[in-house]
Amino acid sequence: MLNTLWLGFFLVAAVAGLYRWLIGDDPAVFGAMVESLFAMAKLSVEVMVLLFGTLTLWMGLLRIAEKAGLVDVLARLLGPLFARLMPEVPRGHPALGLITMNFAANGLGLDNAATPIGLKAMRALQDLNPSSTTASNAQILMLVLNASSLTLLPVTIFMYRAQQGAPDPTMVFLPILLATSASTLVGLLSVAVMQRLRLWDPVVLAYLIPGALLLGGFMAMLGGMSATALAGLSSLLGNLTLFGVIVAFLAIGALRKVPVYEEFVEGAKEGFDVAKGLLPYLVAMLCAVGVLRASGALEFGLDGIRWLIEQVGWDTRFVDALPTALVKPFSGSAARAMLIETMQSQGVDSFPALVAATIQGSTETTFYVLAVYFGSVGIQRVRHAVGCALLAELAGVIAAIAVCYWFFG
């Protein structure tokens, strides 16, 4: 699928370039396309320098949290909930701890770090699966919750915004939190309907109702604030939460007699290993997107969508953020490239760039996750996994656009 998507970018760019040359009398388009290739290759390396540091830092901190027993505590706290949502998984099974770590990495916005942990969790669930080729209910629920991408602290989005010169990288904290909550809720409800999970079980409600009330009350409080105040609050909470998590991990690790420096270094090595394999993919996708933009093909498509939106009388500012949404189900690297390109072409704090960052932080690569997670254990029949995951992703995109209009006007 990625082969087709990547090749398609270049083929579409070639056709658009020929059109601009032969019909539009613009021979300079090919020079612009070649220049874009080299510019995007350079940008890829610049982005990777910061990405190395970000992944290394947070994998090190996650290692401290694991050694301090925070993951085990979370697994025990979530045990009663998992017992209702994944009844075929025995209490205390290693899969529950791995799923918790996977969700923790996703919650911190470390999607690249979450993948290897998620693969271990999927293999542990496969040991309980009576079928070698058909996805179990537990595997589907885990995949959909991954695809809905509950992101509580999107540090990689902050990193991309900082790398592009945003004066306040955490400004999108609250928009992402609200959009990702909508995506995850829709994903959970859709799986619950398909698997006939009893969400009205008293134990499940004990987990869900306080969270829903807290989120609802928080949104009600936000409802009376201006766009300027919302942006300021988002920045404050983003920075406060980010630093608070770091201090909490270190403090609890020290209290539990964890050699925090040594464990951080060990975890950081894992982060370095994860990050170093990303450069080829980032170069490939950023160059393809750059050529697509330089050829004019991306503008042709967006102009068509913009015209349709204008016909129904809607505001069209969000249209320039749609490339990120359209490719996100297929490729995280392509969506990342689209986000970076949007920030470069529109401005890092422009409305389209803010919408694209919120979409990137609140949705996941459905088909990529499906292929990697299920492919790693030989699953061929995915049942209702795709439909539920795509529904969650659509909810995340719609919520991201709506929340950005609310916050940034």
Image (tube, rainbow, N blue to C red):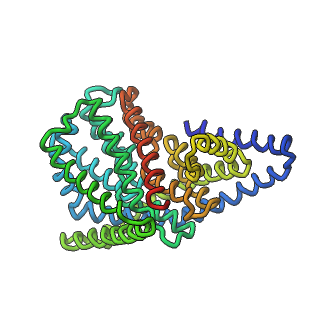
Q: How many marks?
A: 0
Q: Nearer the viewer, residue 194 or 141?
A: 194
Q: Is residue 14 visible?
A: yes
Q: Is residue 347 above or below residue 9?
A: below
- Residue at 28 percent of width and 54 percent of height: 216
Q: Residue at x 38, y 64 (%)?
A: 58
Q: Nearer the viewer, residue 14 or 210?
A: 210
Of all residues, the one furthest to the left in this rendering is 202
Task: Give the left or right position of residue 321, taking residue 240 as reference.
Answer: right
| Residue 238 lies in quadrant | bottom left
Q: Position of residue 162 (x, y in %)?
A: 51, 68
Query: Can the viewer see residue 92?
Result: no
Occupied quadrant, residue 82: top left
Q: Position of residue 220 (x, y in %)?
A: 30, 58
Q: Residue 295, position in %: x, y?
A: 74, 48
User: Along the horizontal axis of the image, is 56 left or right of 163?
Assistant: left
Q: Residue at x 52, y 54 (%)?
A: 356
* Residue 71: x %, y % from top left: 24, 57
- Report which quarter residue 406 is drawn in: bottom left
Horizontal arrangement in the rendering, residue 135 relative to residue 204 (left or right): right
Q: Give the position of the N terminus as an image quadrant.
A: top right
The extreme front residue here reads 313
The foreground one among 203 and 46 is 203
